[in-house]
Structure formats: structure tokens, C-alpha cells
Image: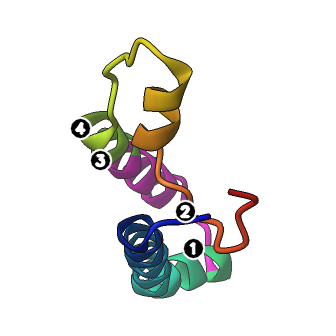
Amino acid sequence: MISGASAAYTVKASLLTLFVFIALAPILRTLTALTYPDTIWALTTALFLVNAALADYSYAASPLQRERSVPSLFLSSDK
């Protein structure tokens, strides 16, 4: 069973992901209309740098702690 705090965190993470995709939709639509290599390289580099800066590279000792540190984006979880 999912606790209230865990469910709220999952919903918040899912909504944040949804809004990021909505914000990126015009950029992706533009990329599919006319694909310029410099645009793809710039977007790829920017997204790589964001991922490298914001990713959690810490190592948790137990698998349970690692499982808790990774946010679940699926609303229909088996837990």
C-alpha cells in the first residue's frame, strides 16, 4: 500500500514530467518540421548537461534505499 506522502510525491513527479513535455512540445514540433543538425546537437548537448547536473549519482548501501531514491513515474504501481 502506498502512503499518503509517497502518493503525493509520485503525483507531483508525474505532473512535473507532464509539464516538461508540454513545454518541450513546440521545440520537438519544430525539430520534426525542418531538421537542422546544429539544432539537434544544441538540444542534445543542453539536455545532456541538465541530466548530468541534476542526476543523483549517490550510492545507497541497501536495495531498499536505492528503490526509495528513484521516483516512480507510473501511477499504476504494484506496491
Where is 52 relative to 45, above or below?
Answer: above
- What's the distance in space between the residues labelled 4 and 2, CA to CA? 26 Å
Which of the marked residues, 2 or 3, is nearer the chain's N terminus? 2
Question: Mark 1 or mark 4, which is nearer to you?
Answer: 4
Q: Could you say where residue 3 lies in the image, as x and y percent from the top left?
A: 46, 67
In the image, residue 40 lies in the stretch drawn in magenta: yes
Residue type (three-letter) at the residue carrying disc 2? Tyr
- What's the distance in space between the residues labelled 4 and 3, CA to CA? 5 Å
Residue that mark 3 sits on: 50
Which of the marked residues, 1 or 2, is nearer the chain's N terminus? 1
Q: Residues within 10 Å of mark 3 (few under 14, many from 20)?
A: few
Label at residue 40: none
Residues under numbered marks 4 and 3 in contact, where contact means CB atoms less than 8 Å apart: yes
Which of the marked residues, 1 or 4, is nearer the chain's N terminus? 1
- What's the distance in space between the residues labelled 2 and 3, CA to CA? 22 Å
Which of the marked residues, 4 or 2, is nearer the chain's N terminus? 2
Residue toward you, 44 or 50: 50
Residue furthest out toward the top:
61
Residue type (three-letter) at the residue carrying disc 1? Leu
Indicate the quadrant where residue 43 lies: bottom left
Residue that mark 4 sits on: 53
Residue that mark 2 sits on: 36
Residue that mark 1 sits on: 31
Q: Could you say where residue 38 lies in the image, as x and y percent from the top left?
A: 44, 53
